[in-house]
């Protein structure tokens, strides 16, 4: 690729973003945000599915597929050398989503 000003600018921006994410507190904050967003999305999905009523099975099937695909992405290799931030954020989202669905099930069951 040619070394244009736009190319150099994009390289500098991505390098600074990587350095910004290298801080462990920022990494933890991104993981907590993904966990809370998964919990929020589970509450929103269960509320919408509860109002519609006729798409419950489809919502359950879609959430099962998304959860299993994320499980496959995160846990596919037996030797995990260095966890990447993207996979950790997706795993946090999945954990928050599953936890949110369990909370909604307990609220509806009581």
Image (cartoon, rainbow, N blue to C red):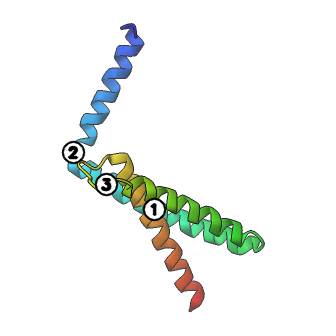
* Residue picked out by circle 3: 29
Where disc 3 sits, the SS reads: helix
Q: Position of residue 66 (x, y in %)?
A: 55, 58
User: In the rendered view of the protein, which quadrant contains the C terminus?
Assistant: bottom right
Where disc 2 sits, the SS reads: loop
Residue 33 visible in the snapshot: no
User: In the rendered view of the protein, which quadrant contains the N terminus?
Assistant: top left
The quadrant where residue 52 appears? bottom right
The quadrant where residue 19 appears? top left
Work out which residue is located at the far front of the displayed protein and give it.
78
Left or right: residue 69 compared with residue 10: right
Mark 2 vs mark 1, foreground winner is 1
Q: Do the CB atoms of the residues marked 2 and 1 lie less than 8 Å apart?
A: no
Task: Of the two numbered discs 2 and 1 on the same chain, state the one appearing first in sequence.
Answer: 2
At horizontal 58% and vertical 89% (from top left) the residue drawn is 109
Mark 3 vs mark 1, foreground winner is 1
At horizontal 41% and vertical 62% (from top left) the residue drawn is 35
Around disc 3, counting alpha carbons within 10 Å, would you say few (fewer than 14), some (14 to 19), or many (20 or more)?
few
Instruction: Looking at the picture, tell me which residue is in the foreground, 63 or 31.
Output: 63
At horizontal 44% and vertical 60% (from top left) the residue drawn is 71
Task: Of the two numbered discs 3 and 2 on the same chain, state the one appearing first in sequence.
Answer: 2
Instruction: Looking at the picture, tell me which residue is in the foreground, 79 or 39.
Output: 79
Around disc 2, counting alpha carbons within 10 Å, would you say few (fewer than 14), some (14 to 19), or many (20 or more)?
few
Work out which residue is located at the far bottom of the displayed protein and give it.
110
Task: Of the two numbered discs 3 and 1 on the same chain, state the one appearing first in sequence.
Answer: 3
* Residue picked out by circle 2: 23
Where disc 1 sits, the SS reads: helix
How far apart marks 3 and 1 lie (CA) works out to 16 Å
* Residue picked out by circle 1: 94
């Amino acid at each position: 690729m040619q070394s244009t000003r736009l190319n150099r600018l994009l390289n500098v921006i991505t390098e600074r973003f990587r350095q910004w994410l290298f801080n462990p507190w920022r990494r933890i904050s991104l993981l907590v945000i993904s966990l809370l967003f998964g919990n929020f999305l589970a509450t929103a999905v269960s509320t919408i599915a509860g109002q519609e009523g006729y798409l419950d099975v489809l919502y359950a099937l879609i959430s099962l597929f998304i959860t299993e695909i994320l499980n496959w992405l995160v846990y596919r290799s037996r030797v995990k050398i260095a966890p990447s931030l993207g996979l950790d954020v997706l795993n946090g989202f999945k954990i928050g989503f599953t936890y949110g669905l369990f909370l909604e099930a307990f609220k509806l069951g009581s």
